[in-house]
Image (cartoon, coloured by chain):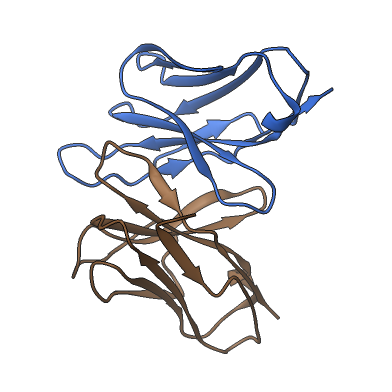
Chain colours: A blue, B brown
């Protein structure tokens, strides 16, 4: 069974703070990891992906991966009210094929207050 | 959601009725997926198609069927709708296994 666990939150941070979102996964052989942002009533949109252990930065977003601990996180620096959304962690456990099924966590709701 | 078009956006069905949710893409991607999203449950994979002419079951396929009519279109059919199928349905496409999904705008389905 391919489980992806996230803290459901809600997580509330003041504007300008760092928001830290965490995710663990059960399939040790998982190869690729994704973070999606979903505004209320909208579809998920991809904001970050990471394949290798360590950090990956893109603007205010940093994804961190530790395969030994089966842990992936997303840091949002200088949080803005527009970052208020649900953040979904997704894991691709497929290997040895061209298939890329994603298994999603239940999401963490983030609120950034002015 | 340029590239992935889902229809309809909203639908109300009575228990036992049937309907087909349509998904079409213009990005020429091989892989297409159907998910449902329920409060507190996250996104769960219903069916997927790795390429034209192939379909496979995901985590929650019971009560659904799919058709990959051609490379562009992937439809999801509910033969006899049940209240438990009340959900938001998302179609997604994928360039290849190392890329994330592009989602359609979703279909909000209510079965009464």
Residue B32, quarter of picture? bottom left
Q: Is residue B110 left or right of residue A47?
A: right
- Looking at the image, can residue A110 be seen? no
Residue at 38% x, 74% y: name it.
B75
In the picture shown, does residue A38 fall above or below A59? Answer: below
Look at the image and tell me in which quarter the C terminus of chain B lies.
bottom right
- Looking at the image, can residue B61 be seen? yes
Q: Position of residue A70 (x, y in %)?
A: 41, 20
Residue at 51% x, 87% y: name it.
B18
Q: Position of residue B84 (x, y in %)?
A: 62, 70
Residue extending furthest right?
Answer: A114
Residue A91, quarter of picture? top left
Q: Position of residue A20 (x, y in %)?
A: 62, 17
Q: Is residue B55 left or right of residue B79?
A: left
Q: Is residue B59 left or right of residue B95?
A: right
Q: Position of residue B109 (x, y in %)?
A: 62, 72
Residue B82, quarter of picture? bottom right
Total count of labels: 0
Residue extending furthest left?
Answer: A96
In the picture shown, does residue B94 fall above or below B53? Answer: above
B72 or A23: which is nearer to us? B72
B42 or B95: which is nearer to us? B95
B25 or B21: which is nearer to us? B25
């Amino acid at each position: 069974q391919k489980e992806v666990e996230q803290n459901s939150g809600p997580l509330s941070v003041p504007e300008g703070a760092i928001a830290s979102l965490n995710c663990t996964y059960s399939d040790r052989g998982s190869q690729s990891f994704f973070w999606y942002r979903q505004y209320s009533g909208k579809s998920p949109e991809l904001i970050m992906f990471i394949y290798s252990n360590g950090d990956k930065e893109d603007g205010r977003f940093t994804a961190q991966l530790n395969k030994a601990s089966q842990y992936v996180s997303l840091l949002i620096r200088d949080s803005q009210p527009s970052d208020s959304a649900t953040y979904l962690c997704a894991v691709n456990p497929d290997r040895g094929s061209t298939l890329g099924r994603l298994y999603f966590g239940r999401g963490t709701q983030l609120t950034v207050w002015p | 959601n340029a590239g992935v078009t889902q229809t309809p956006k909203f639908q109300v069905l009575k228990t036992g009725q049937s309907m087909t949710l349509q998904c079409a893409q213009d990005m020429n991607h091989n892989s297409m997926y159907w998910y449902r999203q329920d409060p507190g449950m996250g996104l769960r994979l219903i069916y997927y198609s790795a390429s034209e002419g192939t379909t496979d079951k995901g985590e929650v396929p019971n009560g659904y069927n799919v058709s990959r009519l051609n490379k562009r279109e992937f439809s999801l059919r509910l033969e006899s709708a049940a209240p438990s199928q009340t959900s938001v349905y998302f179609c997604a496409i994928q360039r290849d296994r190392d890329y994330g999904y592009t989602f359609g705008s979703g279909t909000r389905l209510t079965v009464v």
